[in-house]
Amino acid sequence: MKLLFLIADGMGGWPIEELGDKTTLEAANTPNMDMLAGKGLVGTCRTVPKDMAPGSDVANMSLLGFDPRTYHTGRGPIEAAAQGLDLDPDDLVWRMNLVNISSFEENGTMFDYSAGHIGTDKSVPLVEKLQKELGNDEFTFYPGIQYRHLLVHKGGAKKAERELEIRPPHDLTDKPIADDVKEFAKSPLMNKLVRDAEKVLAGNGTKAVSIWPWGQGKPLTMPPFKEKFGMKGAVVSAVDLIKGLGRASGLEVIDVEGATGLVDTNYAGKVEATLKFLEHGDFVYVHLEGPDESGHMGSVEDKIKSIERFDKLVVGPLLEKYPLDKANYVITCDHYTPIETRTHDAAPVPFILTAPKCIASRLESFSEEIADRTGIIIPEGHDFMQWVLDKIK
């Protein structure tokens, strides 16, 4: 029997007045998830430990069965693993967004954490320019995808920069950046680098007017997924975060052309890649970023659309090829990304586990409230994978 984890990043949220006090999940038309909820177990899982920030890095590491309190070193190191960077143990790896801010000053505002969702074709030349003009023996700029890039500080893990507490830019949309500018100022080195980068990026014709290094840490190391859980597995995602977790744990990383991480991603391509891997593999972690990006943008319409497309274009086609007598399904999200706050929330996430050996819940639909009412809760997210495997034996 195959096992599919289908993850709609940031799908969870709170009731919204304009939707008649429904969540976007409740408002969305999701016949496939509703059917699976009625035929399986429904509950909630705390993917983010109470003492950690509710990021996709922490939450997805938990869902893959690894305790983030043991293995997590930062967002940057996970994405560096995706690129297969050759790093020394004492390097400090930063996730580096290209952002749109009013100015890198204490009176500045974060307009857009994604520089208008800048395309990779425009962002890569900018990062290459930063490397040419600011890169040196200490700092290296590595281009990534869209607005998501990397900055490596050689030997930085032994220096004070490791302790800087810079907030994720997606937490700051339309908010002041004064606290972060002050935090950067604690390091003359980082303060100068960001200000110099602002000069290099000036007048480039895009909304990328500054860099925003954050999520720094030492290189990531994780044990092999196959040794831990006995399955040959793969990850399918548009984002380096998931690819990095996959590569670091020995899962096959499948790239899909046209996968954007947005509402218009290549759904059919992700399904095709999943089906092809399942011809010889046991487990696939299929990740869709669209609901999360829509939540960060505060778009009710796009979040509902992304949830509906996840249900129709991912869950539905996979069920057609692998019905419930041939595969076990987990449907969930890594964390909430509520429209109201436009950032992540650490609330326990709703999940469905549908497998031949599971007793049917006979629920009529799937939502945050319904999942919470069942009383089934996994208090430690990294235990969820083993809990699922025990249920489907």
Image: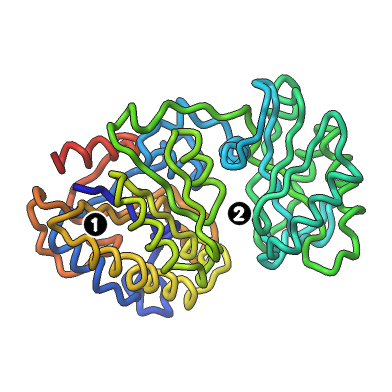
Q: How many residues crowd mark 1 within 10 Å: few (<14), some (14–19), many (20+)?
A: many
Q: Vertical placement of 262 versus 19: above or below?
A: above
Q: Image check: 339 left or right of 374?
A: right
Residue 77 vertical position relative to residue 234 in the rendered view, above or below: above
The residue type indicated by label 1 comes to: Ala
Indicate the amino acid at tag 2: Asp
Quadrant where the C terminus sits is top left
For marks 2 and 1, give the CA distance.
Answer: 27 Å
Total count of labels: 2
Badge 2 or badge 1: first in the primary sequence: 2
Name the residue: 47% across, 50% down.
254
Horizontally, residue 91 falls left or right of residue 373, namely right
Quadrant housing residue 315? bottom left
Q: How is the image coloured?
A: rainbow
Give coordinates of residue 276: x percent, y percent.
Answer: 36, 56
Residue 220: x and y in percent read 55, 29
**Relative to the observer, which residue lies in front, 391 or 304?**
391
Who's the residue at 48% across and 54% down the image?
Answer: 237
Q: Quadrant of residue 159?
A: top right
Mark 2 lies on residue: 171
The residue singled out by tag 1 in the image is: 371
Residue 358 place in picture, x, y as percent? 11, 50
Q: Nearer the viewer, residue 350 or 314?
A: 314
Most foreground residue, 48 or 307: 307
Residue 131's quadrant in the figure?
A: top right
The x, y position of residue 386, in whole percent, is 25, 35
Q: Which residue is at a point 35% across and 49% down the rendered structure image? A: 284
Label 2 sits on a secondary structure element that is helix
Could you classify mark 2 by the number of other residues whose Cα lies within 10 Å: few (under 14), some (14-19), or many (20 or more)?
A: some
Which of 268/382 is in front?
Answer: 268
Secondary structure under the numbered disc 1 in the rendered image? helix
Label drawn at residue 235: none
